[in-house]
Image (cartoon, rainbow, N blue to C red):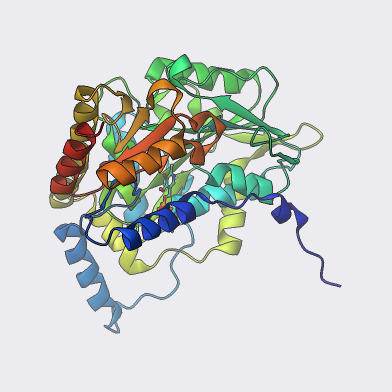
Amino acid sequence: MIKINENFLELQDSYLFATISKKVAEFTKENPNCKIIKLGIGDVTRPIPQAVLDAMHKATDEMGKQEDFRGYGPEQGYDFLREKIRDNDYKSRGVDIDIDEIFVSDGAKCDCGNIVDIFSTDNKVAITDPVYPVYLDTNVMSGRSGNYDDKTGKYENIVYIPVTSKNNFVPEFPKEKVDMIYLCYPNNPTGTTLTKKELQQWVDYAKENKAIILFDAAYEAFISDEDVPHSIYEIDGAKEVAIEFRSFSKTAGFTGLRCAFIVIPKELNGYTENGEKVQLNKLWNRRHCTKFNGVSYVTQRAAEAVYSAEGKKQIEENINYYKENAQIIKKGLEEAGYTVYGGTNSPYVWLKLPDGTKSWDFFDKLLKEANVVGTPGVGFGPSGEGYFRLTGFGTKENTEEAIERIKNMK
Ligand code: PLP
């Protein structure tokens, strides 16, 4: 008899984007002449920069020549890319990372999901709430969650750290002991950030508690404030307590191309049941080489071009385009009297709904009265109730029009 991994039965169906699509489809059917503007999207919309395309064309041609053809590459990624990552993402910020601490992959989503393989199921997991759902669901799948409670919308063994306007979106230390702490900054969905000082406190906390921080910096490229760290390794002591996830998806429009990387410093250890130290870098290397066969040569050449002078310029133009949209949303909503967060170091604007309005009620109102689609905050966790996410990933014209419509709502 084939037995299943019953942890999967603990997963809650994600109704968020399915419900949004269903509601939009129904509305469109009833109102075929309405022009709906979607500001709920978390995907990039600008095409791949020319420098990256040129590199891909060149690499594709090489694959057709006998002398340049490449088969399987190193599972961890080609040195030409890892060296560029080391120099541009770390050395340039005064952070010393070796190339064998960098593992290239096909996405931060997979990395965030796969990393749980190297940790004991006994570990206590802490997530901020609201949160990017992958951290939670992958721990449910691997048996760290316990049962789901319908009333609270929470799993019994997961520690939820609320991040709301009440604590200015700065997560407080959990009262109980935790082992694996997920932090995502700039944050999806709230668009908020932590300062170097605030992140230092978390690094110190992790050190004192022999915990690990799983730091997702997928939106690092959107940072403009000086005081916001681009990498957790800019913080003293972080190499001993943190794994960092990075992605080319939002940085360079690679959501369809797929390339990312994970950094695991050699100083970072986990412990056996007997308290012996084990290098996590070694464990991950073993896991990665066993279950992954590398990102395609063409894609890695594309990622390399992200770091060329032309590539950097073109990427910055795209990022600025999205950031300008986020500012249009932020300023427009503030003028309309709303309280908003994020949108400065992030493509995401997090709107606090007035007078106890529920996330889904605001979704319906926005769709009906402004024909604008956003994402209900409660879809990212119980503490997201009463909030709403809008994104700068649309076109400038649509963003401006959507904000005008929202301003004119009653
Ligand atoms: N991490 C966060 C916080 C995200 O919001 C996303 C995508 O939306 C990802 C990771 C996924 O990145 P990738 O496209 O590299 O899988």
Please tell me which residue lies in front, 386 or 304.
386
Quadrant of the image occupied by residue 182 = top right
For the point 16% across and 43% down, the residue is 401
Please tell me which residue lies in front, 134 or 28.
28
**x, y percentage for residue 197?**
41, 15
Q: Report the quarter where the C terminus lies.
A: top left
**x, y percentage for residue 249?**
34, 52
Residue 216 visible here: no
Number of disc labels: 0
**x, y percentage for residue 173?**
58, 18
For the point 34% across and 49% down, the residue is 41
Residue 59 vs 46, above or below: the answer is below
102 to the left or right of 225? right
**x, y percentage for residue 10?**
71, 49
For the point 67% across and 51% down, the residue is 141
Q: Report the quarter where the N terminus lies.
A: bottom right
For the point 31% across and 25% down, the residue is 340
62 to the left or right of 283? left
Residue 88 vs 50, above or below: the answer is above
Residue 314 visible here: yes
Quadrant of the image occupied by residue 366 = top left
Please tell me which residue lies in front, 382 or 94.
382
124 to the left or right of 237? right
Residue 352 vs 34, above or below: the answer is above
139 to the left or right of 293? right
Please tell me which residue lies in front, 142 or 61.
142
